[in-house]
Amino acid sequence: MSGDLSHDAHLRAALRHAPDHALAPPAGVSQTILNAARQLHKPARPAATPSPAVRITVAPPRAIAWLRQWFASPRLAGGLATGLVAALGLGLWIDLGREPVIDRAPVEAAKETRSSEATPAAPPAVGSGGAREDDRRAEMAAVQQRTPEAPAASRAKRSADAAVIAPQITRDVDPAPPKAPAPRAASPERRQNRVAPESESELAKMSPPETAPPPSAAAPTPAPRSEPAPAVTEVAPAPAEATDAAPTATAAATDNRQRDAAARSDMRMSSAAARAAAVAGARAPAVDPAVEAAAAASPAFTLLRRARSELGNGNARWTWMPPGKAAIVPLDDAAHEWLARVAQATRARWIDTTERASAGEALEVRWWRDDWPQATLRIEADGLRWIEHSGRIRHAPLEAATLQRLRSP
Amino acid sequence: MNNDAAPRVVHADDGDVALMSAFAAGDVQAFEWLYRRHHAALYRFVRRLLGRDGAAQADEVFQDTWLRVVHAKERYVPQGASFRTWLFTLAHHRAIDVLRRSGREVALPEGEDAEPFVPEGTPWSTWPRPEDAIDEVVFWRRAGAKLLECLEQLPVAQKTAFLLHHEDGITLDEISRALGIGFETAKSRLRYALSKLRTCMGAHLDAAALSWRQVPDGDATDSDKPGSGPRRLGARA
């Protein structure tokens, strides 16, 4: 290059004689790099790989080509779209005509029971089950009339439903408690309680979880014996409050029902459920936001959650260099487990620091996302040091025994 | 072109591009040769670029650079720049990333690329006087140590230009293309770097004072013809 500056011979000579001229990368680093290169070729294709140009020129099989062309044709696309719209319309139309009867039954029954409690003017007749049923039907009709915005068709349907509900109400009054509402009432809670530990499953596995399911949802415990099922619970107060007015037969029936429910509950309590109840009892009663925050602030947990999510979606390729290994390998289940152990061991122990390293030897563990470094964890003599790609450094002091356990992947 | 032919067998003394192509085709040995050829220079470059404060991160930058090479083997296409330039550019970008992350200033002060540099201080104020030098080796080692100190004071951009140009023999044209800067900018940065280093070292060598001293073997300048042997410093000044 004509415009290039010529070298300064003195500076160049000085550079060549600088004390760092004989510096070489540490053997471990070199080994890691060479291992990474070897690893990349382990599942490699045979040596005679066709060049991209060849791959392009190779014609695909005829059938595949025809299929591709057929799928790409506007006629097929139009047909598929029409079919999809038709199926959607049909599904909506069918769905319009259906109303879940079973789902409404317990709700209506509960509503009826509550309304009967709230109307002392119409106390149930002693021992006249038929009259009670009639009253309830009348009330049901009144309730339906109180909803003027409901369309006529819907009202007619509700009347029809009421006929279905009526026998069920009778069954509610009967000693036998309804079976369906109990699990259904518990299910939303149970679902909620299951979501939280699964999202932090790694932490939850090894430590008391932040979210403990309430005993009633986890398993039948001795406590619900007095209130075996929600339907019964709602019905039970009526005779208790209206002791003076209510007939003793109703109270007896309620007692019978409670006893039956308790007996059934006892029968249902298998050994597994008993264990679950014991665990539920041992757990914290509610979610501790501080613990939640600590888990969220844990860099190990954050990285674990991110890696799992991205690996699950296939959005990124995560690799890591396990402790004491000079190879970079994909992040697998063992890696997740190890990271979860780190997250668990360091909970609420991370402290921000500016020191990148402490004196003494340390094992380094590193993570990459699509070959870009994400974090470095140094297992030092007195704890762990987490160095993030962003430059943030945190230190978590740990006991020697814990550190020793973490030294093996 | 016969695409069915087996990939060419490469040797340790083959060119970088040939070795890289062989590595892309599955020849791990080719990568090992490439690594051996460039690892020391690249490590030195990274260490010097990061300086004393960033020495702890040199291994990380060095390793990441090579890992990028490993994973980019199939995407690597020699487009004008040599493999070495590409490699050093990768390392430079990674080092800048690390420096930014650690809060060190990597941008040049405004206008520094454009304004002419006026040397300050007295030339030769700290350069070892020839008569103090015990022998050639000691003299140049001292000079080398001093130069590393002077490098610490250079802005990263100027340091990059100087190291790539003087240590790694990359031309200004290649530097400008690799770093994505204009040729004049690269030239200006190098000029600044040289001027500052000369000042820091007791710069602008006095030809008369050092005319007896020869540049050690293998340090021929761009203008030197191969095989011309060592020459007197004074001749250049």
Image (cartoon, helix red, strand yellow):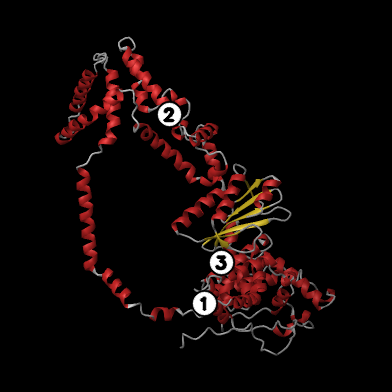
Check the image and report above or below for A255 versus A188: above
How many C-alpha atoms fall within 10 Å of the one at disc 1: few (<14), some, or many (≥20)? few
Q: Chain of mark 1?
A: A
Q: Residue at x 71, y 68 (%)?
A: B148
Which disc is residue B93 wearing? 3
Q: Residue at x 79, y 72 (%)?
A: B128
Residue B193: where, in percent of width, then height? 63, 71
Circle 2 residue = A265
Q: Amino acid at mark 2?
A: Ser
Measure the alpha-carbon separation of dots 2 and 1. 65 Å
Q: Amino acid at mark 3?
A: His
How many C-alpha atoms fall within 10 Å of the one at disc 2: few (<14), some, or many (≥20)? some
Which of the 4 image quadrants contains residue A246?
Answer: top left
Among the two numbered marks 2 and 1 on one chain, the one whose residue lies closer to the N terminus: 1
Residue B57: where, in percent of width, then height? 64, 61
Image quarter hosting the N terminus of chain A: bottom right
Query: Do the residues at discs 2 and 3 belong to one chain?
Result: no
Image quarter hosting the C terminus of chain A: bottom right
Check the image and report above or below for A58 versus B59: below
Q: Nearer the viewer, residue B119 or A34?
A: A34
Q: Chain of mark 2?
A: A
Circle 1 residue = A46
- Number of marks in the image? 3
Residue A288: where, in percent of width, then height? 52, 35
Q: Nearer the viewer, residue B157 or A70?
A: A70
Measure the alpha-carbon separation of dots 3 and 1. 34 Å
Check the image and report above or below for A371 versus A359: below
Q: Residue at x 35, y 77 (%)?
A: A60
Q: Amino acid at mark 1?
A: Pro
Disc 1 secondary structure class: loop
Front: mark 2 or 1: 2
